[in-house]
């Protein structure tokens, strides 16, 4: 499944980029589907910044997935590579549930457009039914399909909430500095 989202934020690109990269944890109060983001590591190398974040999610779980997916399992590790020279973020997540079955990675490009920022997100999400453990063979394709749709919706919702969080954070921060 390919997921594409373009989100606009009415602030300059460099400010949006740095806020997303450096203030992610401070955006959690603006993201209802995220309970916490823990920075595990951060290092600079060859003009790039590499971060590992552990996300704890939440929200509603579809009935078809409740038997095999608890809310506590909605956590993931995100591996990020930030390249300020071209305002990009490349990322990949490793889920805590169905780790062998789920592949999810993408790139965010931060584009400047008329004094605003457009975050162009391109994501690839794949669920391999044969790698889902603890589920009878005859249910694996159905579970994989339901899981892919569910995660796809969560990914889009998280992008939208992140955009809203960045915008609200910057509105409050910029207003307080004036």
Image: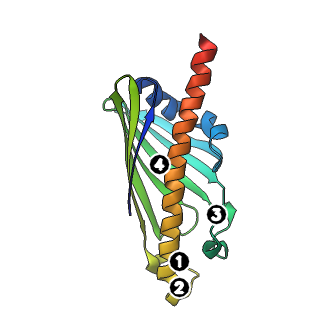
Mark 1 residue element: helix
> Which residue sits at x=65%, y=73%?
63
Residue 79: give x, y in percent of width and height: 47, 48
Which residue does the numbered mark 3 point to in the structure image?
Answer: 73
Which of pointers 3 and 2 indicates the residue nearer the eye? 2
Q: Earlier in the sequence, mark 1 or mark 4?
A: 4
Which of pointers 4 and 3 indicates the residue nearer the eye? 3
Q: Earlier in the sequence, mark 3 or mark 2?
A: 3
Q: Is residue 74 above or below residue 50?
A: below
Residue 139 numbered tag: 2
How far apart marks 4 and 3 lie (CA) works out to 18 Å
Which of pointers 2 and 4 indicates the residue nearer the eye? 2
Classed neighbour count for the residue bearing mark 2: other residues with Cα under 10 Å, few (<14), some (14–19), many (≥20):
few
How far apart marks 1 and 4 lie (CA) works out to 26 Å
Q: Earlier in the sequence, mark 3 or mark 1?
A: 3
Q: Closest to the observer: 41 or 80? A: 80
């Amino acid at each position: 499944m390919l997921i594409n989202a373009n989100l606009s934020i009415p602030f300059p690109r460099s400010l949006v980029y740095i806020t997303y990269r450096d203030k992610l944890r401070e955006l959690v109060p603006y993201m209802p589907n995220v309970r916490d983001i823990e920075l595990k590591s951060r290092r600079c190398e060859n003009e790039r910044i590499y971060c590992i974040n552990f996300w704890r999610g939440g929200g509603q779980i579809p009935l078809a997935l409740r038997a095999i997916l608890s809310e506590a399992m909605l956590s993931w590790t995100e591996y990020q590579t930030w390249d300020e020279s071209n305002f990009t973020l490349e990322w990949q997540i490793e889920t805590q549930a169905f780790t062998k079955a789920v592949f999810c990675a993408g790139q965010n490009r931060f584009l400047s457009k008329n004094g605003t920022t457009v975050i162009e997100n391109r994501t690839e999400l794949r669920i391999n039914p044969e790698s889902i453990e603890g589920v009878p063979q005859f249910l694996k394709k159905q579970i994989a399909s339901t899981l892919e749709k569910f995660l796809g919706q969560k990914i889009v919702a998280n992008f939208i909430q992140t955009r809203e969080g960045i915008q609200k954070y910057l509105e409050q921060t910029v207003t307080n500095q004036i």
